[in-house]
């Protein structure tokens, strides 16, 4: 009797698993990357954006489109932040020099107190005018160095797509 019910349970589990598999595989969202063009060297990676979705590489699966888009945006923002770390904006000439270590007895200043403590340079003073112009040139140089890398990152991640899983893993008819 136990063997008969055990076998029946095993058959039912197998039946339900078989019925549930297409539903699970076809629900939710997936983050996909287009296939790379083989043998492409100079000028960055090229992608086959018109390739069928079945050839795209899955990065991760999600329950909702919002989660998928959120991860895609987080990845892009993280890489853009790394570019800013490689090419940091120089501090403005009016910014106070940062101490390496604050004194342990010194009270932490609020944001408003820190803003009020920043000296404002008089742009009519020739010395300050030169400092400000030099700083602006340096900022433009840094921004020009960042720009190609930022453009490449934005282009790359614009090719990644969040799509419904059933569009990719549709059961054959």
Image (cartoon, rainbow, N blue to C red):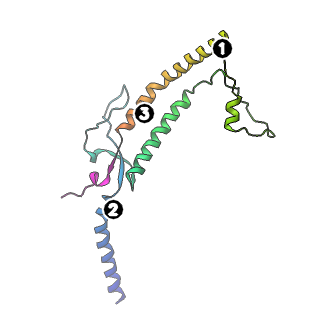
Would residue 107 appear left or right of 87 to someone viewing this image? right
Of callouts 1 and 2, which one flags the residue occurring earlier in the amino acid sequence?
A: 2
> Magenta stretch containing residue 172, yes or no?
yes
Which residue is found at the position 52% from the left and 34% from the top? 82
Q: Is residue 103 above or below residue 11?
A: above
Q: Residue furthest top?
A: 126
Which residue is found at the position 42% from the left and 43% from the top? 72
Q: Which residues are magenta?
A: 161-173
Q: Which residue does the numbered mark 3 point to in the structure image?
A: 153
Of callouts 3 and 1, which one flags the residue occurring earlier in the amino acid sequence?
A: 1
Q: Residue furthest left?
A: 173
Q: Mark 2: few, some, or many residues within 10 Å (few <14, many ≥20)?
A: few
- Image quarter for residue 39? top left
Measuring from the top left, give residue 118's x and y in whole percent.
69, 27
Q: Are marks 1 and 2 in contact (CB under 8 Å)?
A: no
Q: Are marks 2 and 3 in contact (CB under 8 Å)?
A: no
What is the number of the mark on residue 24?
Answer: 2
Give the Cα separation between the discs numbered 3 and 1.
Answer: 37 Å
> Magenta stretch containing residue 67, yes or no?
no
Measuring from the top left, give residue 117's x and y in whole percent.
71, 29
Q: Which is nearer the eye, 34 or 135?
A: 135
Mark toward the viewer: 1 or 2: 1
Q: What secondary structure is marked by label 3?
A: helix
Q: What secondary structure is marked by label 1?
A: helix
């Amino acid at each position: 009797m136990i063997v008969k019910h055990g076998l029946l349970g095993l058959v039912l589990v197998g039946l339900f698993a078989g019925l549930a598999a297409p539903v699970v595989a076809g629900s939710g969202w997936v983050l996909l990357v287009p296939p790379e063009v083989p043998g492409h060297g100079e000028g960055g990676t090229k992608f086959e954006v018109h390739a069928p979705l079945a050839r795209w590489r899955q990065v991760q699966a999600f329950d909702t489109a919002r989660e998928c888009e959120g991860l895609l945006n987080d990845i892009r923002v993280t890489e853009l932040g790394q570019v800013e770390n490689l090419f940091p904006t120089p501090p403005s000439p009016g910014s106070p020099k940062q101490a390496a270590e604050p004194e342990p007895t010194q009270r932490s200043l609020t944001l408003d107190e820190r803003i009020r403590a920043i000296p404002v340079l008089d742009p009519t003073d020739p010395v300050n005018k030169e400092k400000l112009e030099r700083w602006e040139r340096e900022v433009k140089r840094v921004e020009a160095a960042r720009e190609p890398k930022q453009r490449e990152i934005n282009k790359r991640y614009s090719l990644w797509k969040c799509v419904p899983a059933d569009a990719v893993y549709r059961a054959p008819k």
